[in-house]
Each structure stands twice: as C-alpha cells, then as structure tokens.
C-alpha cells in the first residue's frame, strides 16, 4: 500500500467515524433536548382532579364512558351501573402525578413506531379524554406502546417474558397536538375500554344462613335445608322414608354465599333469552332475619344470569333479659342500637342491587343448583342370598346311600319287603328276587349229623 492509498483510507475512516458520532449525538440530543421536561409532571402542576366529571377511554372501535352522576361515578355502557369509586380515584391521582422520564420530538410519520398513531389501526393510541360537568375538555392523554425492561440474563424458562422483558413504563403524549413523545415509569396496564373492569363489584354478603330452599321447574328436584345454629348440621325438610343427607355434599353449601361476586352486568337481554322466565328460585334466610330470593337462569359461557331481591325484619326494640341489671341495660341497649344501625345500612345498600341482572360465576351458584337426589347419601345394596339350583323337572335324582350298610345296593321299586327273621344282606350278595324262599335264621333247622 503506497502513501496515497493510506491517506485515502484514513480519510474514509475519519468520515465514517464522524458520521457515526454525529448520529449518536443526534439520538442523544433527541431524547435529552427537552431536559427541562424530565422530572416534571406530564399533565402540569395543576391538573384539576376535582373538576373531572367525565372520563372517556377509546382504543380502536372500543369505547368506555365513565360519568359522574348523582355524586356517583357510573358506567354508561352498562346502563349507568355504579362504577368503582376507588378505582377511578386511584387512576385520577396517578395521572395527576405522572412524571416525564424521557422526552423526544417525533413527527407524525413516526407515531406508529410508538403505537401513538391516530385512528383505529393496529398502532393506534389509546385516547383518554378528561372533561368537566359541562362537557368542557380539561386534558387529553394518549397511551402508546409499553416500555419493556429486559432482564440482565435470559430466563432459563424461556418464553415471551424471558425474551422481551416486562413492562416498566409507557410511551405517551399529553394531547393530540403535542409534538413530544414522553416516557413515563408506569405502564398503566389496567387502563382499557372494558366496561366490566370498571364496575363497582360490591355485592351482598349472605352470612349466618339458617335455611336454603331451591325450587326447580321439576318439583321432584326441589329441596329445603334447615339448621338450628350457624355451625349446626343441615337437615332435610319433609324428608321422605329412606332419604338421608350426605353431609359431605351439604357441609359447605352456604360457604360461597358469604363471598358472592359477579363478573358483569347483562344489559338489554330479554328474560326468556337468559332463561329468567322459568328460573330456578333459591330462597335463603339468615339468623339476622334477612331474606334473599335469587332467580337463576340458564348458563351462558362460564356465567349464570341472576336477579336478587332482599328483605329484612329488623327489631325496633330489645327485649330485656331475665334478672337484667341496670348497669348491663345501658351497655346492652347501646349494642342493640349499633347492631340495628348496621343492619339497616346493610339492607339499604343491598336493595340497590335489585334492579339489575348479574352474570355470576359458575362456582358461586352451582352448589345451589344441585337437585334433591344429588344431596342424598347413596343407598347401599344388601348382598343377595345364593339359592341352591332347583331340581330339573323329569330328571331322576340320586337316592341317599345306605350309611348303615355300606356297599349294599338300595332297594329297587317292586322288591319284596324284608320279613321278620330274615338275615340281613351281606356285602356283595345279590339282591333278592320275587319268589325266592326267604332264608331261615341261623340255628333253626335240624342239626347236621
């Protein structure tokens, strides 16, 4: 290589290196050009949480509208069913405190790279609109692709999480017209336009169950169970002869009632479509004198449609105990009033659940849908007696052998009966024939000469 070629090579190396350095610096500058924004709140320092009366979440063709009405947040897609106040409050507080981790100016053609493109395409953003009670826009937040943090070492189990990492942030835009794409340190994974995920899932807790009665369309399958104490064994009301409960099948029958929950609320469906025109009716009474009537329709996917009615008989006055002391009366009266208020609040809250049709998970209600025969102990069959085979008609049966004279053939029909004084037959003698002179007893004839 001569000197001229060497100089040319050095110039090329310098040009390539310089271009790489400029590109690296450009990328660094792009992310850090807005250093003043890093660490600042994404939606500003004065995001008016208390003024927000509407939250709209849209992703593609899916939409969710959360609106504050009558001092309650409600889900419009579920006929204004109450939304989870705690979930919405937590979301608003989190949004107000979101801070910028990185920031980059991105042109419209590059938005799809961060899943922040407008419209309904694959890389479209999730758009969140915040409005006040008059419908005036407060702020708009666009959620894009989640930022994945890769592990230091590949997971030995492999799989998607081990290869790609896990979400530790998200690319966002603070407004439709914003030129900056920001990275925040919260993936906001549960912010989706799915109405069932925003419902208030508070549901009646049926405790201290005293009796359960299930009435089926086929009356023979109906049953009623009662017990005398909260922990007592169930007894079958009006048990028929031979019916006995299987305690293994009934011991946990009331347990799911204390943690009732629902997956969603049915909207717009006719009763006959859900099987609620001919439901299975379950009546439940508690030791607190609450009565619940559950109407359960036909199973759809993994849920049963269910309606609920509740009533209660709450005592207004306490009956004093025998030999009750004045000092105890004050304490017992206060305990009675506190419990009375608690029961009244419980009844008032549970009555709000009556207008709706709920979709309840199978594990919750299927124990209540067991038919009468499925609650009974299985009957054990008694072992059958083995009978000797009956004698065949027309086949001669063998006669019993003469045990007194073994080897002597038994008498045949037609043989002459033995006469007194006849010598007994010896083993091996031929049987006597008709007309034979009977043998004389030994010692009776003339003496031999």
Image (spheres, rainbow, N blue to C red):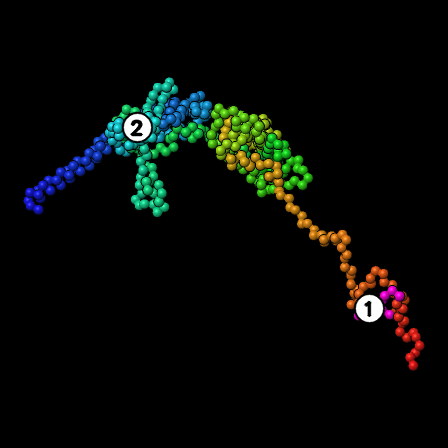
Query: Where is residue 172 drawn, in percent x and y?
Result: 30, 30
Residue 237: name its quadrant: top right
* Front one among 390 and 212: 390
Q: Do the residues labelled 2 and 1 touch (CB within 8 Å)?
A: no
> Which residue is painted at 36% across and 43% down in the image?
159
Sequence-earlier tag: 2 or 1:
2
Q: Residue 258 carries which label?
A: none
What element does badge 1 sit on? loop
Q: In this view, does 271 lie to the left or right of 136?
A: right
Query: Residue beneath label 2, please?
Result: 117
Main secondary structure found in the magenta portion: loop
Furthest residue toward bottom: 449
Which residue is rendered at x = 85% and y = 61% of the image?
414
Which region of the structure is painted magenta? 423-435
**Residue found at x 40% / y 26%:** 64
For the C terminus, the quadrant is: bottom right
Depth check: 108 or 129 in front? 108
Say if 255 sits above or below 433 in the image: above
Residue 109 drawn at (x, y percent) = 26, 28
Q: In this view, does 39 lie to the left or right of 362?
A: left
Which residue carries the number 1 mark?
A: 430
- Cα–Cα span, label 2 and label 1: 124 Å
């Amino acid at each position: 290589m001569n000197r001229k070629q060497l100089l040319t090579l050095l110039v090329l190396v310098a040009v390539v290196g310089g271009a790489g350095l400029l590109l690296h610096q450009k990328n660094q500058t792009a992310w850090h050009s807005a250093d003043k924004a890093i660490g600042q709140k994404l939606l500003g320092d004065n995001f008016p949480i208390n003024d927000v009366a509407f939250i709209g979440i849209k992703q593609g063709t899916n939409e969710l509208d959360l609106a504050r009405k009558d001092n309650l947040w409600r889900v419009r897609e579920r006929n204004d069913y109450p939304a989870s106040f705690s979930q919405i409050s937590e979301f608003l507080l989190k949004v107000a405190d979101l801070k910028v981790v990185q920031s980059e100016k991105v042109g419209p053609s590059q938005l799809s790279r961060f899943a922040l493109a407008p419209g309904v395409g694959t890389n479209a953003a999730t758009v969140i609109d915040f409005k006040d009670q008059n419908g005036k826009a407060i702020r708009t937040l666009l959620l894009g692709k989640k930022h994945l943090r890769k592990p230091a070492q590949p997971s030995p189990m492999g799989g998607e999480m081990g290869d790609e990492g896990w979400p530790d942030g998200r690319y966002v835009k603070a407004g439709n017209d914003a030129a900056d794409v920001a990275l925040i340190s919260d993936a906001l994974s549960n912010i989706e336009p799915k109405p069932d995920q925003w419902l208030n899932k508070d549901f009646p807790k049926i405790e201290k169950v005293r009796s359960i009665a299930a009435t089926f369309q086929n009356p023979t399958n109906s049953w009623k169970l009662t017990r005398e104490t909260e922990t007592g064994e169930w007894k079958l009301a009006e048990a028929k002869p031979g019916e006995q409960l299987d305690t293994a099948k009934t011991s946990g029958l009331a347990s799911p009632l204390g943690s009732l929950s629902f997956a969603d609320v049915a909207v717009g469906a006719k009763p006959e479509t859900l099987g609620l025109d001919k439901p299975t009716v379950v009546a439940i009474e508690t030791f607190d004198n609450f009565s619940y009537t559950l109407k359960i329709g036909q199973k759809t996917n993994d849920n049963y449609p269910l309606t609920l009615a509740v009533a209660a008989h709450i005592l207004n006055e306490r009956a004093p105990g025998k030999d009750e002391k004045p000092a105890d009366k004050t304490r017992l009266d206060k305990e009675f009033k506190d419990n009375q208020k608690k029961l009244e609040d419980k009844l008032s809250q549970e009555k709000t659940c009556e207008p709706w049709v709920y979709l309840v998970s199978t594990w919750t209600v299927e124990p209540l849908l067991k038919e009468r025969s499925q609650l009974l102990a299985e009957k054990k069959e008694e072992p059958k007696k083995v009978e000797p085979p009956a004698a065949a008609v027309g086949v001669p049966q063998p006669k019993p052998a003469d045990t007194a004279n073994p080897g002597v053939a038994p008498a045949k029909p037609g043989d002459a009966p033995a006469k007194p004084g006849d010598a007994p037959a010896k083993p091996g003698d031929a049987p006597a024939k008709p007309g034979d002179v009977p043998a004389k007893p030994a010692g009776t004839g003339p003496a031999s000469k």
